[in-house]
Image (cartoon, rainbow, N blue to C red):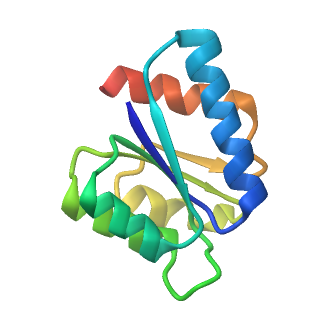
């Protein structure tokens, strides 16, 4: 399974990566690869080169592009990609689901949130 994370907060990226790694290796022993990015431009460049099956996107980013915009591009490039949003801003939920996100998690992300997302992803893949 190929996964990508976009979050401008380094601690949040690292924490999410560790929770995914724990879920995958300790509980499910699946082969996976997680790539994490701090900005939309590098995320989209990498996604275009090798699309992920699952992406975790922060919505509020420090630059001019937000996670909803990134999700729209992901949808165009890989319509079946599974999108999960993670944000501290619950008011974006309606916009998040408009791009067919599978789940919307409010930060701080907990291991239970990761388990929910990954379980949903496994059902779809």
Quadrant where the C terminus sits is top left
Residue 21, located in which quarter of the rendered image? top right
In percent of the image, x 76 and y 36: which residue is there? 110
Q: Position of residue 22 (x, y in %)?
A: 67, 23
Please say if 5 is above or below 120.
below
Q: Position of residue 118 (x, y in %)?
A: 51, 28
Please say if 56 is above or below 64.
above
In percent of the image, x 28 and y 51: which residue is there? 51
In percent of the image, x 78 and y 56: which residue is there? 11
Instruction: Work out whether residue 51 or residue 90 is closer to the camera in this orientation and state it.
Output: 51
Q: Position of residue 42 (x, y in %)?
A: 45, 71
Left or right position of 54 against 76: right
Q: Position of residue 66 (x, y in %)?
A: 51, 76
Q: How many marks?
A: 0
Left or right position of 28 against 16: left
Please say if 94 is above or below 116.
below
In percent of the image, x 33 and y 40: which residue is there? 53
Quadrant where the N terminus sits is top left
Instruction: Work out whether residue 100 or residue 3 is closer to the camera in this orientation and state it.
Output: 3
């Amino acid at each position: 399974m190929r996964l990508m994370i976009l979050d401008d907060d380094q601690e949040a990226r690292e924490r999410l990566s560790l929770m995914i790694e724990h879920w995958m290796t300790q509980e499910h022993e699946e082969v996976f690869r997680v790539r994490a990015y701090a900005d939309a431009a590098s995320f989209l460049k990498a996604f275009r080169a090798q699309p992920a099956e699952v992406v975790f996107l922060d919505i509020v980013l420090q630059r001019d592009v937000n996670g909803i915009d990134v999700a729209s591009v992901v949808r165009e490039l890989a319509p079946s990609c599974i999108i999960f949003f993670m944000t501290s801003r619950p008011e974006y939920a309606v916009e998040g689901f408009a791009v067919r996100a599978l789940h919307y998690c409010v930060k701080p992300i907990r291991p239970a949130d990761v388990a929910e997302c990954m379980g949903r992803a496994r059902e779809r893949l």
